[in-house]
Amino acid sequence: MLNIILIGPPGSGKGTQAKQISTKYNLKHLSTGDILRNEVKNQTPLGLQAKSIMDKGELVSDEIVIGMIKNFIDNATGANGFLYDGFPRTVAQAEALNKMLQQKDMLVNAIIFMDAPEKVFIERMQKRAEIEGRTDDADINVIRKRLVEYYEKTFPVKEYYEKYFTNAFHTINANQEVENVFNDICKVINNL
């Protein structure tokens, strides 16, 4: 089974690319953001807790996220593997994912880092707020806080994978047309 990880700042295009990749390669699309938003929409206790955290521009705890990921993997059937969209978000999550995959005799096949200038991410999040009505993308102060959180907590994940998974780590220029980004990602996956 393939295990492909898409990482990058908020607004880098992970969700857009993940939908296309999961369809083309028959991968289960694992988006912690979608899972969390679904919990919020359904007003579950976890969803209400997550909404409070996300509205402040903060990240949901590793413990909550890792539990959701494990359940997702355990309950998934009929796919060629998994596409992790914006997960792991911390080095602790990356280490927990590696451990969990090893216990299942699986490994991370590719880490795809979506890279672009910060102003591109901000513009995309503001546009997404208008189109999708996402309150976490509407306020520039929340956006900036999310980016600070990303650089403090999630950027080290990029450095971790770059250091310890050298052959599996790939940087993609996310500051180009969606189709070109997709083609660049497909080149990586086709070589697996």
Image (spheres, grey):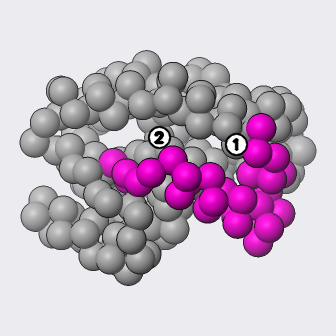
Where residue 17 sits: x, y (%)? Answer: 44, 67
SS for tag 1? Answer: helix
Q: Does residue 75 appear anywhere in the picture? A: no
Determine whether 96 is above or below 27 in the image: above
Residue at x 51%, y 68% (from the top left corner): 16
Q: Is residue 115 magenta?
A: yes
> Looking at the image, which is closer to me, 50 or 104?
50
With respect to residue 38, does 17 lie above or below?
below
Task: List x then y, in percent, for residue 111.
Answer: 28, 46
Q: Nearer the viewer, mark 2 or mark 1?
A: 1
Q: Nearer the viewer, residue 169 or 3?
A: 169
Question: How packed is label 1: few (under 14 Cα within 10 Å), some, or many (20 or more)?
Answer: many
Tell which circle, 2 or 1, labels the residue nearer the N-terminal end.
2
Classify residue 39 as left or right of residue 11.
right
Image spot of residue 185 (x, y percent): 27, 66
Residue at left 26%, top 32%?
161
| Relative to 135, 96 lies left or right | left
Q: Foreground: 54 or 83?
A: 54
Q: How much space separates mark 2 and mark 1, taking CA atoms? A: 19 Å
- Residue at 18% in and 69% down: 187
Residue 70 drawn at (x, y percent): 49, 36
The quadrant of the picture occupied by the N terminus is bottom left
Label 1 amino acid? Ile
Q: Which residues are magenta?
A: 113-141
| Disc 1: which residue | 143
Residue 184 found in image quarter: bottom left
Residue 168 seen in render: yes
Type of residue at label 2? Phe
Q: Which residue is mark 2?
A: 87
Judged from the image, the secondary structure of the residue bearing numbered disc 2 is loop
